[in-house]
Amino acid sequence: MSNMKDLAIRHSNNPILSPENVSPSSAEMVVECVLNPGVFIFNNKIWLLVRVAERTVQNTGEVTVPIYNEEGGLKMLKFKSNDLKLNKEDPRVINYNGTDYLTTISHLRLFYSEDGSTFHESGNLFGAGKYESYGIEDCRVSQIENTYYLSYTAVSSHGVSVGLQTTTNWTDFKRHGLILPPHNKDCALFTSKIHGKYYALHRPSSPEIGGNYLWLAESPDGLHWGNHKCIAKTRQGKFDSKRLGAGASPIKTPHGWLEIYHGATETNRYCLGALLLDLNDPSIVIARSEEPIMEPLELYEKEGFLGNVVFTNGHIVKDDEIIIYYGASDQYVCQAKFSINDILKHLT
């Protein structure tokens, strides 16, 4: 455990969004967690695309599990509690007759703010189709020219993969299906092309050989991805010893692309670190944090649905300042600020 104070300046009103501030999507649902927002600017306002995780109101003697049908409507699966085919030992996942189901289901909800700290609800995006039947999670929003790219985690009985939607006006959305197959998540597109190509960070997972590492992909059109390269691995004994994955889009600085990423230990303690990637060839890592730039220190980061977690996939940049919005304890949305120069000094 490092005794270095982290570099984050936390908002005095954290958490800025809690489950009790957010209305459920229907009368049958209860909001369990609000977390991990994608962040963007539109119409001169700051917007969050927050992951809202809900569970169903439970009745005695049965277990009710929510899933989305092909049309994107909510469907309730009901199992008798005493059914021998039901295994409900894990609070997050139940298994019925060999098939896993999540006990909560996530959708994405829009919030906007004039000042960056007081937010108002404004519409939902739900999962649809067989690859999003268990919900959609942890969206990164990358604005490339006039188009917003929404890369998110799509969850179903087929696995965990990366879905993509695009929009120019936040009213009409174009679905592009899955851009990366299971098991993959934490996909963040770079906000500008490099030598005419799109680039993205992503995190395939391998439980057998390899591990949960950070990868880079390139694309001619933002839809078809290839030339995958592993650019950062877990490090024994450090804050990113078990897994690491991209935060939001890398930030272009004169010194390189600055990527704020999450790293987790074997005990699921999540911190934030930073990588500096070469401007012309982002598969080259110039520098990497030895110590976290942010770690769970406050009570709301240490206690919650999953304690000891700070996790970001959204920020806005103003000059030297990065304003990150982050999930704390997998339960709340919080805000913190960093100086780009402080992070770069910490890297070198």
Image (cartoon, grey):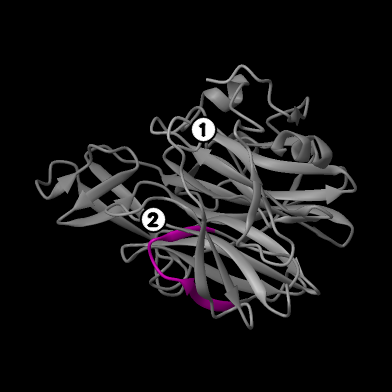
Toward which corner of the image does residue 293 lie, by quadrant? top right
Q: As displayed, is residue 115 above or below residue 199?
A: above
Residues drawn in magenta: 175-186
Predominant secondary structure, magenta span: strand
Q: As displayed, is residue 37 above or below residue 118?
A: below
Toward which corner of the image does residue 109 lie, by quadrant? bottom right
Q: How packed is label 2: few (under 14 Cα within 10 Å), some, or many (20 or more)?
A: some
Residue corresponding to mark 1? 239
Element on which disc 1 rests: loop
Numbered label attached to residue 205: 2
Q: CA distance from mark 1 to mark 2?
A: 18 Å
Question: How far from the left and from the top, in percent, is residue 142?
Answer: 70, 63
Question: How far from the left and from the top, in percent, is residue 276?
Answer: 69, 50
Element on which disc 2 rests: loop
User: Which residue is found at the position 38% from the left and 33% from the top?
Assistant: 266
Looking at the figure, which quarter contains the C terminus?
A: top right
**Magenta span contains residue 286:** no
